[in-house]
């Protein structure tokens, strides 16, 4: 059974995903259908998202540590789906940012995931 707490959490995640799309934080990966890079809300991390049906994955800690086991999407996965949906295709896509960041290979996705270094506090 789905609880009210679960629905509230999903609604909050969906709202954040809609904001990521509105902010132009979803970038398609050239030559890789079903993959996008999503910039997080504060702009200092990028996550590789695979949103092919049945093969959904995201490199963010929320998805890897909690959502994957629970079978629920993270906000980045929702943003990827929203941006790739018919509702999102009429929006002009901003050019992908030019970033030179270290990469970390994510064996779960089989591609290099872009990971920005953590900011000093």
Image (cartoon, rainbow, N blue to C red):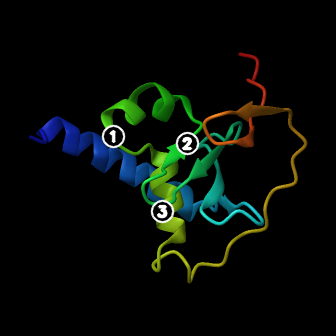
Residue linked to disc 2: 58
- Identify the mark nearer the N-term, 3 or 2: 2
User: Which residue is depicted at the point 47% across and 31% down?
Assistant: 62
Compared to 120, does 87 lie above or below?
below
Q: Looking at the image, which residue sits at the far bottom?
A: 90
Question: In this rendering, which labeled residue sits more in front, label 3 or label 1?
Answer: 1
Compared to 62, does 109 lie above or below?
below
Q: Does any portion of residue 25 appear in the rendered image? A: no
Residue at mark 3 to residue at mark 2: CA–CA distance: 12 Å
Residue linked to disc 3: 81
Q: How many marks?
A: 3
Mark 2 crowd level (few <14, some 14–19, many ≥20, 10 Å Cα): many
User: Which residue is depicted at the point 31% across and 34% down?
Assistant: 70
User: Which residue is depicted at the point 47% across and 35% down?
Assistant: 63
Q: Secondary structure at mark 3?
A: helix
- Identify the mark nearer the N-term, 3 or 1: 1
Q: Are marks 3 and 1 in contact (CB under 8 Å)?
A: no
Compared to 34, does 11 lie above or below?
above
Q: Looking at the image, which residue sits at the far right?
A: 100
Q: Residue 119: horizontal and vertical position, in percent?
A: 75, 23
Q: Residue 75: horizontal and vertical position, in percent?
A: 46, 46
- The disc label shown at residue 71, or none: 1
User: Which residue is depicted at the point 36% across and 30% down?
Assistant: 69
């Amino acid at each position: 059974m789905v609880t009210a707490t679960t629905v509230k959490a999903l609604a909050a995640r969906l709202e954040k995903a809609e904001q990521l799309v509105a902010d132009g934080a979803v970038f398609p990966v050239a030559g890789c259908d079903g993959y996008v890079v999503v910039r997080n809300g504060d702009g200092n991390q990028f996550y590789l998202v695979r949103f092919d049906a049945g093969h959904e994955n995201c490199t963010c800690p929320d998805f890897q540590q909690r959502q994957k086991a629970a079978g629920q999407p993270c906000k980045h996965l929702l943003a990827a789906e929203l941006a790739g949906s018919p509702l999102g295709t009429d929006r002009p896509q901003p050019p992908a940012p030019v970033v030179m960041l270290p990469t970390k290979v994510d064996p779960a996705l089989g591609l290099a995931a872009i990971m920005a270094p953590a900011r000093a506090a």
